[in-house]
Each structure stands twice: as structure tokens, then as C-alpha cells.
Amino acid sequence: EHVLTYDPGFQSTASCESAVSYVDGEAGELTYRGYPIEYLAEHCDFLKTAQLLLKGEMPDEREAAEFRDLVKHHTLVHQQVSFLLNGFRRDAHPMSILVGLIGALAAFYPLDPDMSEQDQHRLAAIMMLAKMPTLIAMSYRYSVGWPINFPDNSLSYAANFLHMMFALPVEHYEPPKAAVKALDKILILHAEHEQNASTSTVRLCASAGANPYHCVAAGVACLSGPRHGGANESALRMLMDLQKAGGIKAIPELIRRVKAKEDGVRLIGFGHRVYKNYDPRAKILRGICHELLDEVGVGKDPLFALALELERIALEDDYFVERHLYPNVDFYSGILQRAIGIPTPLFTAIFAMARTAGWFAQKNEFLESGDIRLARPRQVYVGEPRRTL
Ligand code: CMC
């Protein structure tokens, strides 16, 4: 007998048991497989973090090197994928293109029917981690009309992405070290976050037995929403609007409108369903912003100064204090990506690239749990009782 409880937004319903990551919202702490995010950002790179998430244990040097080689082996995408890309409008949003291209990977890379479902998904995890940067860079270069760059497997994961994005055949390009480091940290910090909306979407798809690439396409579609991954883009746009409206002088008016809930306006990059304290990822990103902006010489990005001031004012305001609204991961990630040179419409795609690790870790955990049950939420029916004309 199941007792039906109504829980809009799943505020108090656990959809699964998971050992992948843990958010302590009160303390403002995040761990992947038990390792604090601060430790991982300091001591690991993205691929090592991805391997930790997938495997459950920190890889040793030999395992990490093997995994790196495996990923490098799959960085190219089928030539036909570029024909598919050519069918998109050049001004299409990269997230729309990504949903399409990733969904299509299921057709380009059919699963081996002799493999178990679990092994199919394990291999797809490596293929997807490898191809995600290639697909994102392809869609960017298509939008600006540049020829597509092949991956350079001699580079690290983050450096190769920057190479595919920005290298032109006419001049030498070396991904700036500070930008590589910052991007790598952004990827680590976005790699996994419990049962958020996109991860739950991916798990739900997997519960139906969907193809692994289709599961990821669904996750990317969900992530594109401005209340989820799309918030980094919206946060930066909010700061740009604020800058246009007068910069620091315009902050009190924005705060007034937010508090009055005028037109439902919210401070984007603030507040979180689980964190009722400072999001630890935002704290690390704020630190990297300082470092990168100093190093690449754009220390005077007015948007960073604006963000710091907005944060200071909000954190002293009763409205935000009472509601436990602190900066979340999206508040500083846009400024940082801008400093790296990543165009605003690609911000959420970078988030998707990172979260691919978490989506696979979670989905594969479910598929390997021995309890593959179709997820089928119930409802509280509030429509008409049975009737006829
Ligand atoms: N600005 C102003 N007021 C806010 C904000 C905000 N950013 N967030 C929440 N509130 C208020 C809200 O109006 C409500 O007030 P009241 O009690 O007077 O009705 C109260 O705080 C509780 O809000 P809620 O919507 O019930 O809280 P939630 O846990 O459902 O919201 C959230 C979480 C992330 C949707 C929300 O904080 C929000 O809309 N933030 C802005 C968008 C954003 O930054 N999203 C990124 C989330 S983190 C990245 C990710 O996980 O993908």
C-alpha cells in the first residue's frame, strides 16, 4: 500500500538513494564522493574529478592516465554531424543546437547489442565526455562562420576546448594558462550536484531504458532553463543591464524592485533550493575571478566590481538575510567565463559539458543499483469527476 503525498517541486521527496555527491545546505558544503569541493578544485583536474564521480574512488596516477587516453581516443565526431550542424540557422542558440546534435549521436554511434545495458552506458560516458567539447566548439564556430577545428589531443581537456574554440589557421594560438586553469575549475565546480532538475531528468529517462545519448539530450534541454543552468547567462545579462542603467548607482533601485517583487523580478544568481548559506562554489569562483582578472589584465572589468557591490548590499539587507538568499554558483561564473573570452550564449553549454560527468555518474549508479524501476510520479487529480454530456 502506498500513501499518496503531494509534494510540489519535490521539496521533501527523495527520488533515489545516491552515493555520488552531497550538499549540506545549512553549512554551505558540497562533497563529491566524500571529497570537499574545495579540495577537488585545489588538487584535481576535471577529468580526474569526472573519473572520481563515475568510479566512486579517487583514481591513482595509472588509472587517471588510462582514463585520459580513453577520452582522447573519442574526441572526434562523425563527419556527418557537421552536415547536420549546417542545417541550423547561424543565429540558433547553442543549447538548441546541442540538444539536437547530442540526440543525433544515438544515430551516429549505435550501441553494441552484445554489451550489457550497464556497459553500453559506461562506454557512452567516455564518448560523451570526449565529444561534448568538440560539439560545443563546433556550434560556436559555425555561429561565427569560422572553419571547424579538430581536437588537439596533446592538450589537456580544458586547453583543448579553448584551442577548438579560438585557434585560427592563420595564426599561432596558445590557450592562456590562467584561462585554462579557470575553465578547468569551472568544470570541476559544475560537474555534479545531487538530484537537481537536469540530473533527475536524466535518471528518469534512464529508468525508461532510453539510449544514453538521448538521456543526455534530455538533461541538456532541462539545463537550458533560466531557473536552472540558464541562470549564469541571465545573471550576466542582469549585471550588464545594471551597468547600462548607471552601474553601482543603480543597485538600490534594482534591490527596491526585487523586494517589491515588481514584475516578479529576482536577483539572478541569488538563492538556492538547497543552500541556505553561501554556495561554496560561488565562493571559490569569486576567488578565481580575482586571480584571473588580475592575471589577464582585465582587473577593471566593471561587472565584477558591480557584482561584488551588489553582493555586499544584498547580504546586508533584511529581505535577503531573512530568506537566506546568498550568491549561488551562477553569480560569478558568467563574469569568469566572460574573462576567459567565452561568449555569453555558450555559458550554459559549458555547464552542460561539466555536468555530463555528474549525469553519467548518477544515471550509471541507478542502472547498476540492481533496482531499475520505471520512474512514474503520481498526481493529485483536481479535474472534473467522470461525466458525460
Ligand atoms: N531574488 C529575490 N527573491 C528571491 C530570490 C531571488 N533570487 N530567490 C528567492 N526569493 C524569495 C522568493 O520571492 C520567496 O519570497 P517570499 O517568501 O516572500 O514569497 C522566497 O525567497 C523563497 O523563494 P522560493 O522561490 O520559494 O525558493 P526556491 O527554493 O523555490 O527558489 C530558486 C530557488 C533558485 C528558484 C530561486 O532562489 C531563484 O529564482 N533564484 C534566481 C535564479 C537563479 O539564480 N537560479 C540558479 C539556481 S542555482 C544553479 C542551479 O542549480 O542550476
Image (cartoon, rainbow, N blue to C red):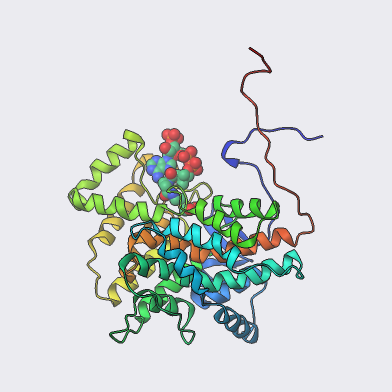
Which one is nearer the viewer's eye here, 112 or 278? 112
Q: Horizontal placement of 193 versus 281: left or right?
A: right
Tell me, yes or no, if residue 56 can be seen here: no
Q: Where residue 65 sits: x, y (%)?
A: 60, 85
Q: Residue at x 64, y 66 (%)?
A: 33
Task: Answer with the quarter of the image where residue 330 lies.
Answer: bottom left
- Count the numbered circles shown: 0
Residue 154 sits above or below residue 280 on the image:
below
Tell me, yes or no, if residue 210 can be seen here: yes
Q: Horizontal placement of 165 versus 8: left or right?
A: left
Q: Where residue 205 sits: x, y (%)?
A: 64, 52
Residue 324 sits above or below residue 280 on the image:
above
Which one is nearer the viewer's eye here, 231 or 105? 105
Q: Where residue 366 sits: x, y (%)?
A: 71, 58
Q: Residue at x 24, y 71 (%)?
A: 298
**Residue farthest along the top direction in this orientation:** 389
Q: Residue at x 61, y 73 (%)?
A: 51
Which one is nearer the viewer's eye here, 280 or 156? 156
Which one is nearer the viewer's eye here, 22 or 338? 338
Q: Where residue 177 sits: x, y (%)?
A: 37, 81
Please identify the quadrant where the N terminus is shown: top right
Q: Horizontal placement of 57 versus 154: left or right?
A: right
**Residue farthest along the right direction in this orientation:** 1
Please identify the quadrant where the C terminus is shown: top right
Residue 254 sits above or below residue 356 on the image:
above
Query: In terms of image quarters, where does ligand 1 lie?
Result: top left
Q: Residue at x 57, y 72 (%)?
A: 49
